[in-house]
Amino acid sequence: MLVRAFVPAHITAFFVPVFHDDPLKAGSLGAGINLDKGTNVFASIETGTLERHIHVAFNGEPVKREEAVISYSVAEKIVPKDFMGEVEIWQYFDFPSGYGFGNSAGGALGTALALSYAFGGTWLKAAQIAHEAEVVNKGGLGDVVAQLAGGMEVRVKAGGPGCGVVDNLFFEDYKVLVVPLGRLSTKEILDGEVVKVIEVEGRKSLEKLLKDPTPERLMALARAFAERTGLLTGELLELAGELDRVLKSPSSMIMLGKGLFALVREKELESAKALLADLNVPYDVAEIHEGKPKVGRWFGEGYR
Amino acid sequence: MLVRAFVPAHITAFFVPVFHDDPLKAGSLGAGINLDKGTNVFASIETGTLERHIHVAFNGEPVKREEAVISYSVAEKIVPKDFMGEVEIWQYFDFPSGYGFGNSAGGALGTALALSYAFGGTWLKAAQIAHEAEVVNKGGLGDVVAQLAGGMEVRVKAGGPGCGVVDNLFFEDYKVLVVPLGRLSTKEILDGEVVKVIEVEGRKSLEKLLKDPTPERLMALARAFAERTGLLTGELLELAGELDRVLKSPSSMIMLGKGLFALVREKELESAKALLADLNVPYDVAEIHEGKPKVGRWFGEGYR
């Protein structure tokens, strides 16, 4: 049996980390955008061996348990203890890991959904297992609930699935331009002094967004947050300024990665692309993924 | 400006009403199925008049305020007090009202989403306004949150949007066969003695479903609930028995309408249709609507 799950890449625009001893009450406040590119998880389940085996691969390459702690912990919880067979979990990422696209949560949630589909379970329980694995292993705090909500999401009450509350903005006709330039360590930033400024600025941004809940306001608040927290500086800030010259809404920084994102109208797309090509900067364009992740039996011609 | 919202028809399989003075805490526990047919709401907004006008029409026929209390109350909350112009809300229902397809909530939620899209607002706030109008005016308790969740939903914590918690089952390849035969008054049943049995049986059904969360179990529990509460009797029960002869999963009663529903595999569809045609009974077949309602600007060639 082969099951496929698609989980959107999730870009955080601004956030407030909310820590709690109970992983289901830990999470984040904030806002972000889900893309129609992201993480595809293919779970292959075959019976007929004498042992219970679970294997995880990233982009076609098998990875060891210590390199995929979150995915293995999700799988161990869902695959029944007495299952005799091979479970292979193939995760494919459209964006590089560590760049702020929520790959970790995408892998966790995709694995949880695909395996729950195969072995029994529900959406909520699968999502809770993914969220807990993310929180406990410091993969992230808010990506799983954000990816479940889809679209342009606003986390108005922190917490995991069934506990936190996620709202959605109405929007139309936007594509998302992303400029992925490198990694940032979420752990390092959340352990540093900047987290205090993030908490203050994040709460302010959320309050302001809920008073004027539009995509344009989201981007303006994201940019202000990125600059005021001191996370967006130097060359990245300069590049954001360049992009702003050809776009109506400000671009902002991917939280947390060395990269930028922007909402782009169809008619703005060509000039933005031309600018980035001129500057010799890598970029990608995605649609916004509305609604839930996808999961279902897979009858495709292989692992694409 | 013309905005369209689609809200799925929602069939309740079993339920426990949960009353509360705070409408957002009122709701229901239970399970049900969302269909790809349901309620389409077209909101036409035109400025340039000297007064603020709101009009509602059901299936092309204008209706008076007292005949559309829920929709008018939703619209009055969302259309700004100082708006000068015409707001026309055209609601089209794929199933007859009062038959248990959640038309009331579909109209309320569709109106709230379309008007919030046009006038500003968020998904959560729109949904809360629709839920409150439903609860206060006794349109229903759980349809709005169920329609927001889509798919095969399980209400595990009662309450309105942002307060209640809705889970989803995994399923594959089912269509939904519906046999709509007539109306039942939700109000009368909820005010009667049967509500005590409903509460006991509904809770038991929910508990059992969460232990074995599959579509087949949902249908078996729905049928047991319908019979044990004494709601499914007489000719309707006989018809359910007839249907069971050609289907693998039991059919059950639409809560609350004089009608039946069943999960049908592609290969079972023809024999079910033939049986119902033989019995000269009206029926319809729908797909399951997964995910959220739809809302967006409408550029169609008129009101379909």
Image: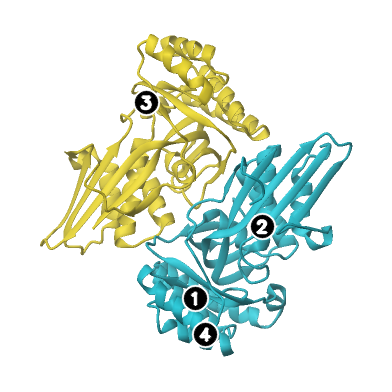
Chain colours: A cyan, B yellow
Name the residue tied to disc 4. Answer: A279
> Gap between marks 3 and 1, in whole Å?
51 Å
Sequence-first disc among 4 and 2:
2
Q: Which residue is mark 1?
A: A222
Classed neighbour count for the residue bearing mark 2: other residues with Cα under 10 Å, few (<14), some (14–19), many (≥20): many
Q: CA distance from mark 4 to mark 2?
A: 29 Å
10 Å crowding of disc 3: few (<14), some (14-19), many (20+): few
- Residue A175 showing in the rendered view: yes
- Mark closer to the observer (2, 3): 2
Query: Can you give x and y, in whole percent of width and height, for residue B108 in the image?
Result: 33, 44
Distance from label 2 to label 3 (Cα)?
54 Å
Judged from the image, the secondary structure of the residue bearing numbered disc 2 is: strand
Separation of marks 1 and 2 at Cα, in angstroms:
29 Å
Q: Which mark is residue A92?
A: 2
3D distance between C-alphas at marks 1 and 4: 24 Å
The answer as to whether the residues below labels 1 and 4 share one chain is yes
Give me the chain letter of mark 2: A
Q: Which residue is the extreme one toward the front?
A: A301
Q: Do the residues under discs 1 and 4 have CB atoms within 8 angstroms? A: no
Q: Which amino acid type is marked by label 4?
A: Leu
Outermost residue on the left side: it is: B50
Q: Nearer the viewer, mark 1 or mark 4?
A: 4
Quadrant housing the N terminus of chain B? bottom left
B46 or B165: which is nearer to us?
Answer: B46
For disc 3, the marked residue is B188
